[in-house]
Image (cartoon, grey):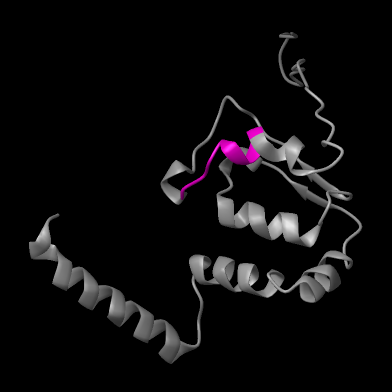
Amino acid sequence: MGQRWEEQLKTLFSAYVDAKQAQNVLDYDDLLLYWAQMVSHPDVADDIGNRFDHILVEEYQDTNRLQSSVLMALKLGGPGLTVVHDDAQSIYSFRVATIHNILDFPNEFSPAADVITLDRNYTICGQRRH
């Protein structure tokens, strides 16, 4: 893009932020940032996290560091937190998803989280079984 687009992008982004504020709306990134700020206060994170016996996150391979930090704050220490992932797929790298979230997950806790590997695939339709 270079410098020729820099001023136009700044102007566009500023207009976007102004429009959101004028309409009192948040976009997806705003929501993540608000969640992260909110759960950075341990009492608030504890209060919200205790409202749920269990949090299940599917497609954990598609989370970014900010999303992971929100989850970890809600279920500090790990009890009540389950994540599911398929290390053969990841489609959100454009949203800064990182495989390190899932690779590091078990060791985020003491003792380390249990890892259960599902290595069989049963199809409902068709004859194929592995």
**Closer to the camera in the image, 26 or 39:** 39
How far from the left and from the top, in percent, is residue 64?
55, 49
- Direction right: furthest residue: 53
Whether residue 106 sits left or right of residue 8 in the image: it is right
Seen at 87% across and 53% down, the residue is 54
**Closer to the camera in the image, 23 or 83:** 83
**Closer to the camera in the image, 76 or 27:** 76
How far from the left and from the top, in percent, is residue 11?
21, 77
Q: Quadrant of residue 20?
A: bottom left
**Residue 39 on the magenta segment:** no
Above-or-below relation of 11 to 58: below
- Direction front: furthest residue: 110
Query: Which quadrant: the N terminus?
Result: bottom left
- Direction left: furthest residue: 4
Query: Which quadrant: the C terminus?
Result: top right
**Residue 102 on the magenta segment:** yes
Seen at 71% across and 9% down, the residue is 128
Above-or-below relation of 130 to 12: above
Q: Report the span colored magenta.
A: 96-103
How far from the left and from the top, in percent, is residue 121?
74, 17
How far from the left and from the top, in percent, is residue 9?
21, 69
Q: Quadrant of residue 111?
A: top right
Whether residue 96 sits left or right of residue 38 in the image: it is left
Q: Quadrant of residue 93?
A: top left
Above-or-below relation of 27 to 122: below
Seen at 68% across and 70% down, the residue is 40
Seen at 75% across and 16% down, the residue is 119
Whether residue 49 sits left or right of residue 96 in the image: it is right
**Closer to the camera in the image, 66 or 9:** 66
Q: How many marks?
A: 0
